[in-house]
Image (cartoon, rainbow, N blue to C red):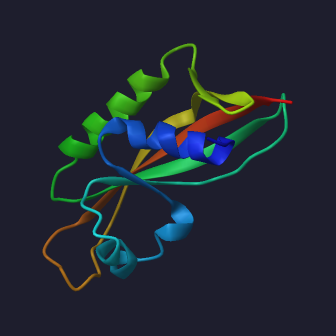
Amino acid sequence: MDNVQALHSFWSSFGVAAIDEQSAYDNKTIEELEIDYPYISYEVATDSFDNAVSIGADIWDRSTAWDRITQLAKLINAGIGRGGKIVPYDDGALWITRGAPFSQRMDAQDVSSAGGYDLRRIHININVEYLSA
């Protein structure tokens, strides 16, 4: 597993689908991939040893309530913990810590053909240090 796969492994460890944001262009793409709500879309950025990279992710839900994705944000927060989370990969590891602010609620009107629900989003900020030579 390389560092990008390790990042995917981290985001996929919370019981919902996780996709690189470059795969999440619009609702049609999400439907074609048959991804259910809620799901996580995340940025991919890498760097060399001893450099922290700020990475954003979004938890998406099609709902009239915030409960489900608020609980998911809490699960991610706990999964990172106070000292961070180490995710090993071939020849190195990711050290993931909480960014600031850690999470922020956002919502937008649903403009898809499905209609009837608001699209909810919680934006998550993390810092990733790539611990490899």
Q: In the picture, which quadrant includes the C terminus? A: top right
- From the viewer's perspective, tell me whether residue 95 is left or right of residue 74: right
Q: Residue 49: percent from the left, percent from the top?
A: 84, 31
Q: Quadrant location of residue 129?
A: top right
**Residue appearing at x 29%, y 64% in the figure:** 35
Of the pair 126 and 132, the residue shown nearer to us: 132
Count of number-bearing discs = 0
Q: Residue furthest top?
A: 83
In the drawing, does residue 68 fall left or right of residue 51?
left
Q: Residue at x 27, y 74 (%)?
A: 110
Residue 106 in the image: above or below residue 114:
above
Observer-nearest residue: 12 or 43? 12
In which quadrant of the rendered view does residue 98 lie?
top right
Decide if residue 118 is on the left or right side of residue 121: left
Residue 20, image x, y percentages = 53, 59
Question: Closest to the observer: 88 or 16?
Answer: 88
Q: Position of residue 115 (x, y in %)?
A: 17, 79
Q: Nearer the viewer, residue 98 or 25?
A: 25
Residue ID at (58%, 46%)? 5
Quadrant holding the N terminus: top right
Tell me which corner region of the image, top left, top right, bottom left or bottom right, holds residue 132.
top right
Name the residue: 22% across, 66% down: 118
110 above or below 123?
below
Looking at the image, residue 15 sits to the left or right of residue 18; the answer is left
User: In the rendered view, would you say 40 is above or below 22?
Assistant: above
